[in-house]
Image (tube, grey):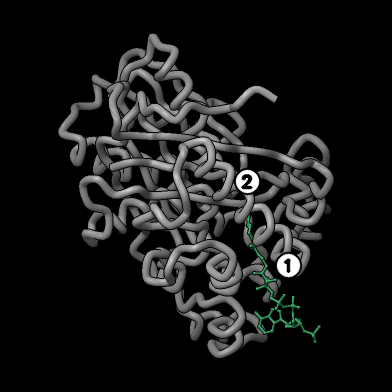
Amino acid sequence: MRSPSHAKAHVQVIGTGTYLPDRVLTNYDLEKLVDTTDAWITTRTGIKERRVADKHQATSDLAVKAAHKALQDAKLSAEAVDLIIVATATPDMFFPSTACFVQKALGIKEAVSFDLSAACSGFLFALDAARRMLEEGPYKTALLIGAEKLSMITNWEDRSTCVLFGDGAGAAVLQRRPGSKGVLSTYVRSDATHTDILWVPGGGSRAPATAEVVAKKLNTIHMEGKEVFKLAVHKMISAIHEALRLAHKKDTDLALLIPHQANLRIIEAIAKRVHVPRERIFVNLQKYGNMSAATTIVALDEARREGRVREGDLVALVAFGAGLTWGAAVIQF
Ligand code: ACO
């Protein structure tokens, strides 16, 4: 198979930003909603609290706030953007795309804007697509957003899933700037053997949101947690190794590994199998839970703000999600 990536960087990440809704839902709050405890959630997942968007906020509202911050960080005005990709599993509506609503809110007259659906791996898939589109041209500046309002598709009566997820948005500005810094590799894959272990079976064209579908909560997240857990560990380890190989780097070269923040035990299982010391593995799931496509970009932004990504650092992002989908990227800052 032809190598899906190049080791030379052509595209740089020049700004990042985050928006997290104000409302905090703690494990103690969840104890009042379902038969669970803070102790169970903490020991089984590592999550302590998550954010929940206001009922009037749509995914694009979260996305736009993150986009403003990323543009500010990049010291660019919105008119410079000619490509917008929003990775989301919770779009504002079937159409127009959430990306078009972002474009409208940012006042960008003309761009190529579209949504990308790859669940929790969405930001990695968007990074892979944008990198190639910027390399090929004519696009010069891309706004990549991972944004989710998962509270909308959460079954708040199902203790096995409702404790895991949160709402939020992260954005990155990418620009075509050939050189030694930037996105060295991206690697993304899907295996559709297991479409039914993590899905929202109702609410789409297969089972439209009739009263019966809604009453059965088929329009909410359904997951076989144990199966997903095992595959997540296996696929994320392989993605890290593939992205490093494509970048001509080793795991020991990494200054920071930013894994998808679904479960601390998944991250610990990965940590045992890659040569990256625990202090170089970024974890923020205790504060936000799993924000699906927003997770890795929010974590990258937070790591940068905390001074954990310095000039010259090699950083890897890795994610796994429904589909199944998985992917990784290696970036030289
Ligand atoms: N509180 C208390 N007890 C609970 C809760 C809860 N919130 N949830 C489940 N339990 C119970 C179960 O009912 C079960 O009880 P039983 O033994 O009497 O039947 C027991 O705890 C064990 O349940 P398991 O499902 O076996 O627990 P497990 O250790 O596997 O943890 C979890 C479940 C946290 C969901 C884990 O499997 C996991 O993290 N899976 C991966 C999730 C993930 O990575 N998703 C990523 C992608 S998300 C996306 O793409 C949108």
The image position of residue 57, as x and y in percent, is 42, 49
Mark with earlier residue (1, 2): 1
Left or right of 16? Residue 191 is right
The N terminus appears in which quarter of the rendering?
top right
Left or right of 331? Residue 219 is right
Say the numbered circle drawn on residue 54.
Answer: none
Q: Is residue 173 above or below residue 167?
A: above
Some atom of ligand 1 lies within 8 Å of the CB belonging to the residue at label 1:
yes
Residue indicated by mark 2: 326
Image quadrant of ligand 1 equals bottom right
Q: Is residue 192 above or below residue 264?
A: above
Front disc: 1 or 2: 2
Residue indicated by mark 1: 225
**How many numbered markers are drawn?**
2
Looking at the image, which residue sits at the far top?
Answer: 138
Residue type highlighted by circle 2: Trp
Left or right of 159? Residue 180 is left
Estimate the spatial distance between the alpha carbons at disc 1 and disc 2, rounded to whole Å: 16 Å
Some atom of ligand 1 lies within 8 Å of the CB belonging to the residue at label 2:
no
Other residues around mark 1 within 10 Å, as few (<14) / some (14–19) / many (≥20): few
Residue type highlighted by circle 1: Gly
The image position of residue 134, as x and y in percent, is 40, 19
